[in-house]
Structure formats: C-alpha cells, structure tokens
Amino acid sequence: MRDVAIIGIGCTTFGEKWGSSFRDLFVEAGALALEDAQLSGEKIDAMYVGNMSAGRFIEQEHIGALIADYAGLATHHIPSTRVEAACASGGLAFRQAMIAVASGMEDIVVAAGVEKMTDVEPGASTDTLTGAADREWEGFVGATFPGLYAMIATDYMHRYPLTREQLAQVAVKNHYNGARNPIAQFQQEITINTVLKSTMVAEPLRLFDCSPITDGAAAVIVAPLERAREFTDTPIRILASAQASDTITLHDRRDISTLDASVAAGQRAFRMAKLTHKDIDLIEVHDCFSIAEICAIEDLGFCKKGLAGRLTAEGETALNGRIPVNTSGGLKACGHPVGATGIKQVYEVVQQLRGEAGKRQIDGATIGMTHNVGGTGATVAVHIMGVD
Amino acid sequence: MSVARFWRKIPQRYNMLGTKCETCGRHFFPPRSFCPDCRRSGKVVDYKFAGLGTVVTFTVIHTANEQFEAFTPYVLAIVKLDEGPRMTAQIVCRPDQVTIGMRVKSVFRRIAADGESGIIHYGTKFVPVE
Ligand SMILES: [Zn+2]
C-alpha cells in the first residue's frame, strides 16, 4: 500500500445559501481545492463525491456524472463515483479516494462532499434526514432524528453524571469556535442560557443542541506521498483510515449510549497509525447533537465513559484545552450540509496542521483526527492525518 | 409512504407477530427469517409476542416530521419486550408520566395521518401497565 497525502483543500462558506445551486456549490469547492494544489483539472484521475440525498433535496440523482461534467471533466471521461452513507457520506468518499491512491490504481483523486438542503421546506428536510435511521421501524412510528439522539441523551443522563448545563457547554464552545471560522454558518457566540431557553425539540434536547440545516460543499485532493511535493510545500499525510458499521436502528444496539462503531473505527485508526491518544493535537467529531459530541469524545477513548461532560465544562475541549474538539465550530456552529461534513472535517484539520487556521489556530498542531457518523451510529469513519 | 409499503407489514404492525429461533431461543421483532447467531443451523418459526415490556429510554417529541405534526407533544420510547427484543414506539401517556423502567403493554392505535393521501396509519403503541 502506498502512503497518501492531501495536496489541496477547498470549501464554500456554509449556510442557507439561497443564491447558490447544488452545481454552484460543488464547482466552487472544487475550484478552490484545485487552486490550492496549483493543479489543473485535466490532471485529475478520479473523483469520489459524498452526497446523502440529492434525490430528495433537489430531485437529482446521478451525482457522480453531474459533478464530473460541471467540473469540466466530461470530455476526460474520468471515473466519478457518488458515495452515500447518510451524514457519513463525506467521510466515506474521502476514504474511497485514499484507498484508490493507496492501491496504486489512481494518482490524483478528488474527494468531495456536497449537500443543498434549503430548496425544500424544513419539514421535508427533517423527514429526509429521518431516512438515515430505519424508516420502517423508527421513522414510521414517529421517531425523528433529534428524537433518536434525545433517547441517547435520556439514557446517558440516567446512567452517568451529565448535567443539562454541561451538555449546553458543548454548543457554547462550538459557537465560540464558529465565531472564529470565516466559513461557519453561525458567527456569533452564545451562552449556556441561549441553549437552555431555546425551543424544545425532543426532550432533553433543545434547538441549540441541534446542528442546523445547511447548504455547502467541500473538496480535498489526495495524491501519492512521494509525488505530493510536486504540488505543495505542506503535504498532509493520511496516517490512518478506518470505517465501521453497526445496527441501523438505535434500539438494536448493544448499549444505547455507546456508538460501538465509533469505538471500533477509533481503535482501528489508532492501530493503523501506531499512535496513542496523547499524540493527537485536535479532533473534529460528529456533533450533529450536543450529546453526540459527548459520546464521541468517550467512544474514541479520549476520556472514560461518563466524564466528557466534566471535561467540556472544565474547558479541556476548548481551543486552549488539553484536547481541542471541533475547532471549526463543529456541525453545530459551522453547519451540517450532510454529505459535505466529512470532507469539511478534513478541510479543518488540514488548515490546523498547516498553521492556517487564523484566530482558532492550535499552536504547534502536527496530528489531527476526524470522526464522521452516519445515522445514529450505523456507519462511522475515522481518519488520522499529520504533518509530513 | 405508499399504501402497499405500509400494508405489507400489517401482521407485524398490528399483531406483534415476530419470529423465534428454536435452536438458540432468541426472539426477533421485527421478524427475521435467518438467525444471525445460529446461521444455517438455526430453525426460525413464527412467534406472537405477548406485548409486555419495559421502557429503556424515552423522549418527548415537540418538533415532529410532517405526518406527526398534529400529535405533538408525544412520548417516544425504546421498549424492551419481555421476550428480549427492543423496539421503538410511542407511549400513550402524559409526557410527565413516562419513566425509565416503566412497565408497558402494546395496544393497537392510530399512528399517523398522511396529509396528502388522507390515509390513516395504524400500528402498535404502548400504554402504562397499572
Ligand atoms: Zn438461533
């Protein structure tokens, strides 16, 4: 297997982008990534695109071909493949691109993610997202996506000492980081009271515990490490790529409050990279809901089960903490265009490792991790990357 | 959802009809015709669940998907059936009444109303056992 490096990154701003179409979004992200790698499009050998539900959000399928076409590559006939794993679509697209290069099959590969969510009514987008869970045995009986994570929160708070205020601190911290990220959907800081006084969505989760509906796209370009310096002075090496699955329904899990797929993918990633938790300078985790960040920190092994609330309240996951979590603002504040999120996480870590993260820069960061979840934990992708 | 898609599962949705593996004794709801533990040596037969169970975890839904908007707030829970399997279902009770560990039994109720087609869907909910 060949070593693989990231040679270019690009991302649109995230938000309710009424003026931008699906095509506008991915063309913008792709062009930014190519410019970053100082690469012209015809050098690209293949593309993998993470997208959850263009079929329901914009009534468009066949996304792989559409993107290759609008990227100006239709006449080059490169393979372009859509990857779908609900909210983990981006993370899996990145992994497929990495595998394609590692195998020696391709050299220069684009991993992108895109979602245009605001062309449908909020009720319709909520319903589409419910398709990431089990439609027949969860959605049909009245489960919503926030509702499923709320049941994780209820179980968790019954068994471990997590306070409502500690849970709110996850959103407060992520908004603080988002306010320092120019691409973030939400640029304003909030307080614990903002969260506690927001509309109840699914008890105990309120509006500010939930990630928003977002439009956006992100793209990264990977290449063999041995060729990376043809394109960039700061290649970021992919040290590990891991993916794991679990039951599609929440109710069939071994433990409601533990995402076993996160545990498995995390352990595999550490093994592959031959690293320990102490080596990791920052992590981007899948905080689709505040409780999800709490679970992620624990399931990836950064603290014992039951202690992530205290870790968060004590500031250990903040920009200046022991293990900064979601420096981008996370899904909560940066936004969550579902298919693009996994790629945006890589985009953030690369910016941090290059020292280009501006006001949210973690000084001296050399190794970062991403954690991308599909559904309530039925698919998880974990990647570790470091300065070469 | 299409009419056929919903009605196809009527025996299960209405009657708590699942399956059981006679080799290892594991129960399945929703039904599986293949035991993941015993694989080819499993012998899977139909099994009618008693409909009694315990609340494992719950939430109260305030913001619902379109088909359920008329029913908010409603209690949604994961119920562990006495035979072993867990399922997601609504609990017919006041939001402040539901607790972890509460004993419940299954009932046949209206689940949702489909605004566009006007079709009313029925299925299994749970009520507290006194
Ligand atoms: Zn069996």
Image (spheres, coloured by chain):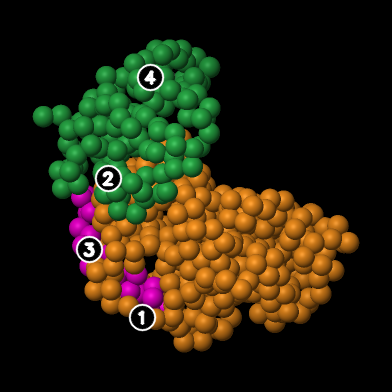
Chain colours: A orange, B green
Q: Nearer the viewer, mark 1 or mark 2?
A: 2
Tag nearer the camera, 3 or 2:
2
Identify the residue at horizontal 68%, vertical 73% (top origin): A28
* Outermost right residue: A75
Q: Is residue B77 visible?
A: yes
Give the amino acid type for the residue marked by disc 3 in the picture.
Arg
Q: Which residue does the numbered mark 4 point to in the structure image? A: B17
Disc 1 with disc 2 on a shared chain: no
Q: Where residue A189 is drawn, which disc sits there? A: 1
Q: In the rendered structure, which amino acid carries the disc numbered 1?
A: Glu
Mark 3 and mark 4 on one chain:
no
Tag of residue A164 = 3
Q: Which residue is mark 2?
A: B74
The image shows residue A118, relative to residue A89, as above or below, that is below
Q: Nearer the viewer, mark 2 or mark 4?
A: 2
Q: CA distance from mark 1 to mark 2?
A: 32 Å
Name the image quarter holding residue A356. bottom right
Q: Is residue A242 visible?
A: no
Q: Determine the secondary structure under disc 4.
A: strand
